[in-house]
Image (cartoon, rainbow, N blue to C red):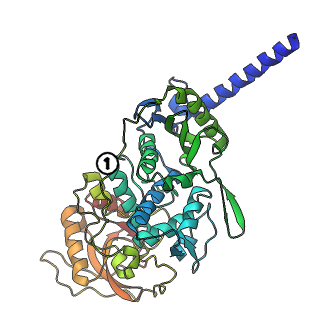
Amino acid sequence: MGGVVLRRVSLARVGLALSVCVAVGFGLFAGPKTAEANPRYAALVVDARTGNVLFSRHADAPRFPASLTKVMTLYVLFEELEAGRLSLDTRMAVSAHAQSQPPSELGLRQGQSITVRDAMLALVTKSANDAAAVIGEQISGTEWQFAQRMTQTARRIGMSSTTFRNASGLPNREQRTTARDMVLMGRAIQERFPRRYEIFSTQSFRYGGQTYRNHNRLLGSVRGVDGIKTGYIRASGFNLITSVRDGGRHLVAVVMGGRTGASRNAHMRDLIAQHLPRASSGPRTSFVMARAPYSAPSPVPHPARLPMAANALVATAPRSQQTLPAPLAAAENVAVLSSPMTADMMGTYAPATLAAPTPPPAPAPATTASAPAGMQLGGVPNGGWTIQIGALPSEQAAVDMLVRARSSHGALTQRTPYTQTVQANGTTLWRARFGGFTDRGMAQAACSALEAQSFACLAVRPDR
């Protein structure tokens, strides 16, 4: 009997030690060294029936969402399915851009196609970055335009501290969120699309002769867990949004910044065990979003069906007729990319079914378009750095954009404005650029100032 008692005590001590390790790993113990121990940690547990916060740590601190981003990618895709612009059997073309996405990926190749259904399952289980890019390009023409719509959608459902720059969650210093916004997103997708949300409970997916198991290891191992998504990049640590329903209670929780996937999962299990019994089992009294009818983001035809010239970085019709909050109004026109690429790729990601863009011609001489007095247009610089703020369908439109940019940022009076033609999918566009920057840092600083004034901007070499 004594041996049995000692063994029980020993196991209890082991369990306590493991709990302490998990808590220390996430910085749960209050004290002066908590932030230094794990500055990426954040967590929030919300009673989905009442909206009451049951646990909160750094819930409003900025964090990188990593692949939690894909929940919003699917939210927007669900809107397209609801609107009838896509079906589960719609085949989406794979572009060179989608093929270039780093792992985790399905290994899609340019010229292939994938159904909406398979792409959805690939995001939920494999967290495939190439499939996320395919979805973004299908819906909005380019992935960066799709990210703008994601940000707009986030604002519409109340995510005030989130900005998306891509559809996958791959590293981008400006793609930020908070634990509070991630919980809100997890609740909103269930509220808005209760039937489609069920895809997040998929435990495995077979594609191309391979079976992909869901990265969310809590599915099937923790009672009541019905989704929803894991995420990881080095800058974020290990993230997880979880929904759990049991005994008439419903929690949505997020853990961000885990040092390992195992410690993150252990912490989430602990949060569920502690706080699910405290959740309400009564009637639902909180709704996370208004069920307003979905309005198309643009009055023009669906972007994926437009000629590629219409998807270039141009001053187009507003994506929504509603008045946008100031942070969103700026984000709507900002193009920040997660990997190096040429400026015109921002507007010319061509689906594989379209003709590949032709190589750009030799730099054009100084433009002959009408410029206002006091602004002398120059030619293409021979070196240094330039900034591009648009690729417009007419030379005069490019000049007009240069004028607006210079009036918004006075320091540009010291730079040389110019236009340059480029061929994109058989269509001539005019780049609107400023030259005269000696290094990339100066060009990026100018871009930051312009982005604050709602301009898109990218620092590039003159020959790019």
Q: Is residue 292 left or right of residue 201?
A: left
The number of discs equals 1
Neighbor class of circle 1 (other Cα within 10 Å; few <14, some 14-19, many 20+) is: few
- Picture coordinates of residue 184 (x, y %)? 41, 44
The foreground one among 430 and 85 is 85
- Name the quadrant containing residue 75: bottom left
Q: Residue furthest left?
A: 373
- Picture coordinates of residue 278 (x, y %)? 50, 26
Residue at 41% across / 52% down in the picture? 192
Q: Which residue is mark 1?
A: 290
Residue at 57% across / 78% down in the picture? 110
Residue at 23% across / 59% down in the picture? 322
- Is residue 383 at all visible to an observer of this figure? no
- Picture coordinates of residue 289 (x, y %)? 34, 46
Q: Is residue 11 left or right of residue 366?
A: right
The foreground one among 327 and 292 is 292
Q: Is residue 128 left or right of residue 54?
A: right
- Name the quadrant containing residue 455: bottom left
Q: Is residue 188 left or right of residue 321?
A: right
- Name the quadrant containing residue 379: bottom left
Image quadrant in which the C terminus is located: bottom left
Q: Secondary structure at mark 1?
A: loop
- Picture coordinates of residue 63 (x, y %)? 46, 44
Q: Residue furthest top?
A: 2
The foreground one among 156 and 78 is 78
Residue at 27% across / 85% down in the picture? 366
Image quadrant in which the N terminus is located: top right
Q: Which amino acid, by three-letter code, is at mark 1? A: Ala
- Is residue 414 at all visible to an observer of this figure? yes
Q: Is residue 189 above or below residue 88?
A: above
